[in-house]
Amino acid sequence: MEINISTRDLRVFLAVARTLSFSQAAQQMHLSQSALSALVARLEETIGARLFERTTRAVALTAAGSVLALHADELLANWARTVDAVHDVTALRRGTVAVAALPSLAAGIVPQLFRVFGRRYPEIALKLIDTLSESAFDLVRQGQVDIALTAANPAHADLIYTPLTTDSFVLLAAVTHPLGQDPAPIRFADTLQCAHISMTRPTSVRQYVDAAAIQNNIAFHPTYEVDHLATIGAMVVQELGVAALPAMAAAVIDNDRLVIRPLIEPAIRRSIGLVRSRDKPFSPAAQALVAMLHELIADL
């Protein structure tokens, strides 16, 4: 059976229970005595039990009224705590935002975003999962993260993708490598005379390079395929080959023994954006984080 009792009903009941006087309770609740009596009568009807014994001289709690009196304060306190918790969330004093990000972004803009956001909203917990593109989409779909920062992929049209910026590909070479002697732009085809170190096929980086090669009738067969940017950086330093990487990824590999050259003909670009669920609305904290992300991207 559904019982519809408001917090006002409970407060009226407690005022009568504590004063054992309908007239005093009416004054406390700023109601007429007849209005207060009507509220109590409606509460008794809703519960299905008399709460007070009333005579011309006295008011007393019934057994049912005594039980309700034991729990009414707790119910009101729980409701107050619930309302406070909701206010904390909307006022950004409580909550959690989980973010999935490509490794290049997790080591690039995300730490800056978390630092600025954490200073402004210190009570909001932030969670970061650095992962590859396919996993990032899955984490959003499964509800494990609020947003993902990753490259565009039309295969995931069930999710909402909002472009943030464009990342152009560059060539990474050791300063002692023949292609590392000149920082000028270089044609992609002219790099293929050398061994290439590439990320594996499931990664968005490899997918963009492969697509550009196919569209321009270029045969791209990397000598090495690895999963981590740090590995690519270390192998390039040792002159095991060169690497075609997005500029954001190349920037993560901070080494003064490396040269970064813009790639041209074709210029390879990938769209970097924000992925979210179509079914799950943003929490106030997630909305604030996204707004701050747009501000940081605009300042880059």
Image: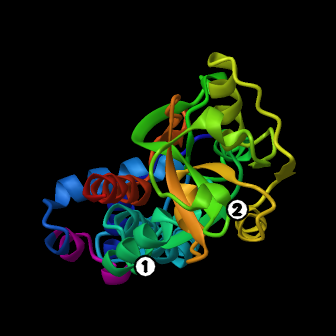
User: Up-down: is 122 above or below 221?
Assistant: below
**For this view, does 9 lie left or right of residue 247?**
left
Q: Is residue 216 visible?
A: yes
Q: Which circle, 2 or 1, is nearer the viewer?
A: 2
Q: Tell me the amino acid under the disc marked 1.
A: Glu
Could you tell me what secondary structure mostly forms the magenta stretch?
A: helix
Name the residue at 31% across, 58% down.
Answer: 300
Q: Which residue is mark 1?
A: 123
Q: Is residue 103 visible?
A: no
Label 2, label 1: how many angstroms apart (C-alpha)? Answer: 33 Å
Question: Residue 272: x percent and y percent?
Answer: 49, 42
Q: Considering depth in this image, is 149 or 212 the residue closer to the camera? A: 212
**Does 38 appear in magenta?**
no
Q: Considering depth in this image, is 66 or 231 the residue closer to the camera? A: 231
Residue 172: give its label.
none
The kind of secondary structure element at disc 1 is loop
**For this view, does 169 lie left or right of residue 156?**
left
Is the N terminus in the top left, top right, bottom left or bottom right quadrant?
Answer: top right
Question: Residue 43: x percent and y percent?
Answer: 42, 52
- Pick whichever of labels 2 and 1 is earlier in the sequence: 1
Look at the image and name its color scheme. rainbow
Q: Residues within 10 Å of mark 2 (few under 14, many from 20)?
A: some
Question: Residue 254: x percent and y percent?
Answer: 57, 74
Q: Considering depth in this image, is 209 or 43 the residue closer to the camera? A: 209
Quarter location, residue 131: bottom right
Q: How many marks?
A: 2
Question: Residue 274: x percent and y percent?
Answer: 48, 43
Q: Residues within 10 Å of mark 1 (few under 14, many from 20)?
A: some
Q: Tell me the amino acid under the disc marked 2.
A: Leu
Quarter location, residue 27: bottom left
The segment highlighted magenta reads 18-26
Q: Which residue is mark 2?
A: 229
